[in-house]
């Protein structure tokens, strides 16, 4: 459920007309609904109420400071994968002791900073990473809290680019290797073994792969317990899917309950790292139809947003709903490819969409709150879009549109003295 709906044939974001917001800030722009973020986080919080837990929102899904701040104020923790994400969380008011640090390639300076601020846990993904972390912690005279990310070799039945828990994926370590790493970590004076972690993929629409992974992780916990290594938390990662089209993913409530049912009596704190299920349907991307082009064979709507603004359709062939911001009472529908100005055939937002369009119309791309703006780029020297957050009948610019000057602010030409001969 979200807070975007039609009222009198006009799309609204909470209590505001999307048309008016887009006209005020220009297009393309992302519009987020504060109430929807809250609703999605609370769905997890309510489901897990009464069971020891920590909900660590996956910052990569949408790292805008306003989004992080709303979630931090509602008590969320955060899953980060870089020092950049960590600084964002801290700047947005997130608490370091509610941060888990994931990722296969943590750099030394990132480990240092995370130890300095005191993150809750490092989710360690390999033997050399464990070794490096131990060194850094020793240098700093600290003890690094760790969990090992296990790759349980479970098929999440999702897009291959976002499957992470199969043995051919780069993530985590095998069950056997995990046991070895725990053995060495347990005797290190600079490591504090506190948990175990896995994340099998994203946009999962069934509970069973999560439960299969959970069984495998619980087996490891049991083996370790028999050896005297007791873990405090189990982190099952993120991955719960959302409805983009016809998908029917389980509700967070159903998912969390199924997991907690299995954990009852274990004494383990449950950590989850949801990203998409919190942010995706809390955001739209609004774009303007610049031209309608008919080439005798196809109809194209050329819009002012492109693959640099929203890459999911181009990169994964992802389908996102594209709806009119204002529904016309006259005119007729045609089947359009919705394409951007970027010079690539792969630059499309949607294909074969039945829409009644006129030049100048605004279109809203639904479910764009996760992996939308965060994956945008400056390709074709296009400035990145504005981001706006709506709260009831108020709107706030939470990131201004990038200017032309900003596009090359960090660049410079070679000096006159360089060997450039005409
Ligand atoms: N935790 C870890 C360690 C992850 O790698 C991810 C996502 C999450 C949590 C959050 O997963 P979620 O709840 O959002 O499914 N760009 C792709 C999605 C990539 C997901 C990468 N990892 C897309 O647009 O579909």
Image (tube, rainbow, N blue to C red):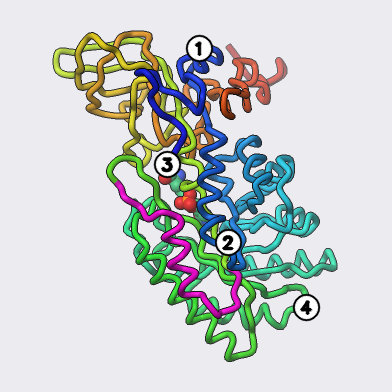
Nearest the eye: 119 or 294 = 119
Instruction: Say few, some or many: other residues with alpha carbon within 10 Å of mark 2 (under 14 / 14 to 19 / 20 or more).
Output: few
Residue identified by numbered label 1: 23
Q: Nearer the viewer, mark 4 or mark 2?
A: 2
Q: In the image, 87: left or right of 393?
A: right
Question: Which element type, helix, strand or loop, lies under badge 1?
Answer: helix
- Which badge, 3 or 1, is on the more N-terminal residue? 3
Q: Nearer the viewer, mark 1 or mark 2?
A: 2
Residue for point 34% across, 59% down: 206
Residue for point 50% across, 12% down: 23
Residue identified by numbered label 4: 189
Residue identified by numbered label 2: 49
- Which badge, 1 or 4, is on the more N-terminal residue? 1
Instruction: Say few, some or many: other residues with alpha carbon within 10 Å of mark 1 (under 14 / 14 to 19 / 20 or more).
Output: few
Where in the figure is residue 334, as x and y percent of width and height?
19, 18
Nearest the eye: 397 or 133 = 397
């Amino acid at each position: 459920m979200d807070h975007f709906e039609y009222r009198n044939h006009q799309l609204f974001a909470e209590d505001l007309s999307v048309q008016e917001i887009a006209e005020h800030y220009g297009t393309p722009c992302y519009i987020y609904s504060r109430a929807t973020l809250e609703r999605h986080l609370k769905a997890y919080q309510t489901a897990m109420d009464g069971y020891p837990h920590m909900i660590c929102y996956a910052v990569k899904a949408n790292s805008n400071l306003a989004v992080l701040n709303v979630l931090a104020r509602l008590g969320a923790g955060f899953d980060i994968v870089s020092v950049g994400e960590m600084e964002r969380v801290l700047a947005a008011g997130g608490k370091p002791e509610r941060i888990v640090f994931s990722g296969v390639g943590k750099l030394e300076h990132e480990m240092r900073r995370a130890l300095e601020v005191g993150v809750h846990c490092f989710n360690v993904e390999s033997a050399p990473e464990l070794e490096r972390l131990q060194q850094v912690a020793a240098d700093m005279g600290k003890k690094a809290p760790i969990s090992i990310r296990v790759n349980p070799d479970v098929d999440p039945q999702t897009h291959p680019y976002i499957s992470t828990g199969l043995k051919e994926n780069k993530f985590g370590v095998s069950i056997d290797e995990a046991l070895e790493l725990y053995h060495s970590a347990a005797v290190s004076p600079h490591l504090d073994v506190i948990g175990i972690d896995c994340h099998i993929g994203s946009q999962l629409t069934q509970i069973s792969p999560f439960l299969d992974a959970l069984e495998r992780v619980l087996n490891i916990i049991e083996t370790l317990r028999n050896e005297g290594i007791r873990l405090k938390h189990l982190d099952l990662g993120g991955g719960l899917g959302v409805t983009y089209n016809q998908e029917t993913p389980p509700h967070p409530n159903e998912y969390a309950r199924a997991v907690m049912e299995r954990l009852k009596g274990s004494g383990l704190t449950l950590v989850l790292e949801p990203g998409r299920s919190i942010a995706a349907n809390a955001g739209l991307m609004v774009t303007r139809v610049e031209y309608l082009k008919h080439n005798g064979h196809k109809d194209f709507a050329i819009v002012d947003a492109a693959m640099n603004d929203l890459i999911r359709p181009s990169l994964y062939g992802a389908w996102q709903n594209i709806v009119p911001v204002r529904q016309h009472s006259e005119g007729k529908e045609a089947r359009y490819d919705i394409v951007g100005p970027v010079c690539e055939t792969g630059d499309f937002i949607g294909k074969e969409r039945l829409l009644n369009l006129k030049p100048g119309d605004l279109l809203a791309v639904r479910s764009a709150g996760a992996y939308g703006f965060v994956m945008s780029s400056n390709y074709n020297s296009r400035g990145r879009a504005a981001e706006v957050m709506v709260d009831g009948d108020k709107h706030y610019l939470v990131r201004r549109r990038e200017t032309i000057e900003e596009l090359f602010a960090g660049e410079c030409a070679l000096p006159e003295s360089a060997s450039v001969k005409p």
